[in-house]
Image (cartoon, rainbow, N blue to C red):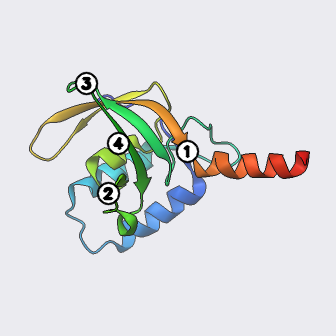
Amino acid sequence: MNEPPITIVQSDFQALERLLDTSSDQTLPGIGMLRDELNRATIVGPDEISPDCVTMNSTVEFVNDQAGKAYQLTLVYPDQAGAQGTVSVFAPVGSALLGLRVGQSIRWQVPGGRQLQLRVVAVVRQPEADRRNKVNSALAG
């Protein structure tokens, strides 16, 4: 499996670790994949994360390179999934996107044995960047 470097915000990392430890269904396919991703991630503070990196609650545009299809989804915690335009971090696609930066690709196995080649095209909205922009606007104003 192609594994590009990934970066995760410390608060997201801690919340995901707690969620994994308390999840009632440890057999979900995304749980093992998410654990693997967390184990190899570089953990940073919210002010250190690049605005082009997919964090929790980020809206991301990505392409499935094999199918040539583009998607725009918001990466959410499992209890927020189900709304249109969201993907759970417990879903294989969600755990694959976490921590990637614009331009990075990852080959990811989904249930049924198929592999997807996902490429991040844009981070449309990222909570950490939004907070920084608000603080900078307040300081400038």
Q: Looking at the image, is mark 2 or mark 3 nearer the viewer?
A: 3
Q: Residues within 10 Å of mark 1 (few under 14, many from 20)?
A: some
x and y, in percent, of residue 57 in the image: 49, 54
Instruction: Determine which of the numbered discs, if any, sits on residue 125 in the image.
Output: 1
In the image, taking residue 54 as reference, residue 84 lies left or right, namely left
Instruction: Determine which of the numbered discs, if any, sits on residue 90 in the image.
Output: 2
> Which residue corresponds to the image point at 51% horizontal and 48% vertical from the top-left?
55
Instruction: Give the quarter of the figure containing the N terminus.
Output: top left
| Distance from the alpha carbon under mark 4 to that under mark 2 | 10 Å
Secondary structure of the residue carrying tag 4 is helix
> For this rendering, which residue is in front, 121 or 53?
121
In the image, taking residue 79 as reference, residue 122 lies left or right, namely right
Circle 1: residue type? Arg
Can see residue 4?
A: no
Mark 3 = which residue? 68
Q: Earlier in the sequence, mark 3 or mark 1?
A: 3
| Distance from the alpha carbon under mark 2 to that under mark 3 | 24 Å
